[in-house]
Image: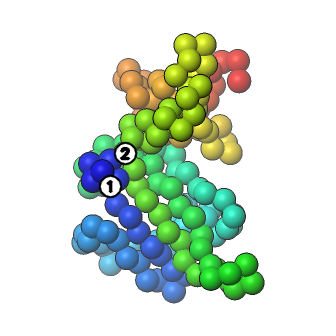
Amino acid sequence: MSKYIVRRFVATKNGVFVVYPGTLIDKNYDPSQRTWFQKALASPTKLIFSAPYLDVGGSGYIITLSHATSKSKKDPFQAVVGIDLTQGYFHKLLNELIPECGLDNLTCFIMNEMGYLITHPKLMKPAGRGPVEYTHITHNEAFV
């Protein structure tokens, strides 16, 4: 699984940031300023998916899944936990979890609230159309 799961991490509001596997992190890196952290905090009951982006560690395109945690419903936010997966592995998981995705007449995809794709079959073969990070649903599914 280590070639598909790039890293796991936990971040708190007061600056604690633990990453596995361990790595050197720029001293100015502030996880609380990252989109994955802020969106998880804003929607504590939801699982947050990032748009695909190039991993600084060289793992290619990855997707971050993050979720805010607390001790109980009454307790305030405790931390944001996250995992970075390779884009291909995330796409494979979607297809395995939803068997209908394998049908010839059906296209399964996930997009964010602004219509940018997180996963789509055509993102697996971008064909030189530019960065995967900025692929809007209308580029691949004209009828949506």
| Mark 1, residue position | 6
Residue 86 placement, left or right of 31 = left
Amino acid type indicated by mark 2: Thr
**Marks 2 and 1, Cα distance to the nearest angstrom?**
7 Å
Residue at 60% x, 70% y is 68
Classify 23 as above or below 15. Answer: above
Relative to residue 59, is residue 115 drawn left or right? Answer: right
Q: Residues within 10 Å of mark 2 (few under 14, many from 20)?
A: many
Which residue: 27% across, 67% down?
A: 21
Q: Which mark is residue 90?
A: none
Say which element carries label 1.
strand
Q: Nearer the viewer, residue 57 or 75?
A: 75
Q: Specify the quadrant that holds the C terminus.
A: top right
The percent coordinates of residue 91 (x first, y second) are 46, 36
How packed is label 1: few (under 14 Cα within 10 Å), some, or many (20 or more)? many
Place of residue 140 in the rendered image (x, y in percent of width and height, measured from the top left): 57, 22
Which mark sits nearer the N-terminus, 2 or 1?
1
Name the residue tied to disc 2.
Answer: 86
Residue drawn at x 49%, y 35% is: 96
Counting from the top left corner in percent of width and height, residue 97 is at 53, 38
Q: Is residue 49 above or below residue 101?
A: below
In the image, residue 92 above or below residue 3: above
Label pair 2/1, CB-CB below 8 angstroms: yes
Residue type beneath disc 1: Val
